[in-house]
Amino acid sequence: MIAIEPSILAADFTRLGDQAREAEAAGVEGLQIDVMDGRFVPNITFGPGVVRALRPLVGLTLDVHLMIVEPERYLADFAEAGADRLVVHQEACLHLHRVLQSIHELGVQAAVAINPGTSPLVLEEVLDLTDVIHVMTVNPGFGGQTFIHSQVEKIRGLRQMLDEHGQDIPIAVDGGIDSTTAPLVARAGATVLVAGSSIYNSKASVAENVAALRASVT
């Protein structure tokens, strides 16, 4: 089954709670909260307060994507705020193994994201500590970017690597995901679609956009 996680980075910030509820009513499996610090990526977005505000409003998995340097400094803050899963970037973690251990010690799931220029091979030694692998299909930092098609082969190679290691780890894809690109990544082995602009836009309702995205991969 393919899971869908809307990214609230593309939501209407004046209606954040309502838009989270609209996504839940549309049947999505989770929400992604993109945390950016203006250092690891050239943008600044949310902090633990947003996670804390959304937690009582929805029963969805809150997937907190930490696009920040030194993520280990803030793991406890986001876990205490209500995150169900913390996503850290391989490129931002000097001691990735230790960071993933720390996340699990906080009682939440641990995920690793890799940028378009990073090989999945760097994750081989931490697969046992990884609940989800996020493949960035754009360079992180801003919503609404164009899908990088070379990442389809990376996803296929990652799926093969996981199969060879006997690891049934979900592969999430993040960046430029819509009804055109979703089938490409799903066929390559992705099982979680993180989508922002294709779900939160003025062209149709959240429910209609979620239905269109789901229909494209079924």
Image (tube, helix red, strand yellow):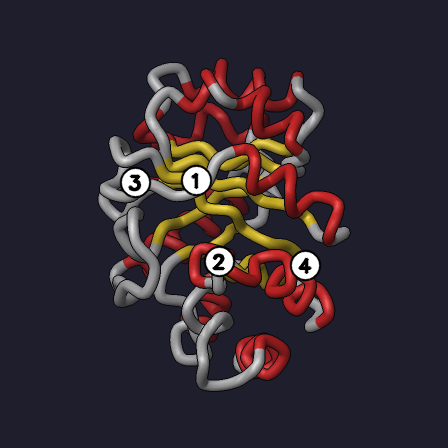
**Left or right for 196, reference 26:** left
CB under 8 Å between callouts 1 and 4? Answer: no
Which residue position is annotated with label 2?
13
Residue at the disc numbered 4? 29
Number of numbered discs overlaid on the protein picture: 4
Picture quarter with the C terminus: bottom right
The type of residue carrying mark 4 is Glu
On the image, the x and y values in percent for residue 40 come to: 27, 33
In this view, 129 is above or below 180: above
For numbered disc 4, what is the local secondary structure?
A: loop
Single out the residue that lies furthest toward the front.
Answer: 14
Q: Amino acid at mark 2?
A: Phe
Q: Please report contact status of discs 3 and 4: CB closer than 8 Å, yes or no.
A: no
Disc number for residue 51: none
Nearer-N-terminus badge (2/1): 2
- Marks 1 and 4, Cα distance to the nearest angstrom? 19 Å
Q: Which residue is mark 1?
A: 35
Q: Quadrant of the N terminus?
A: bottom right
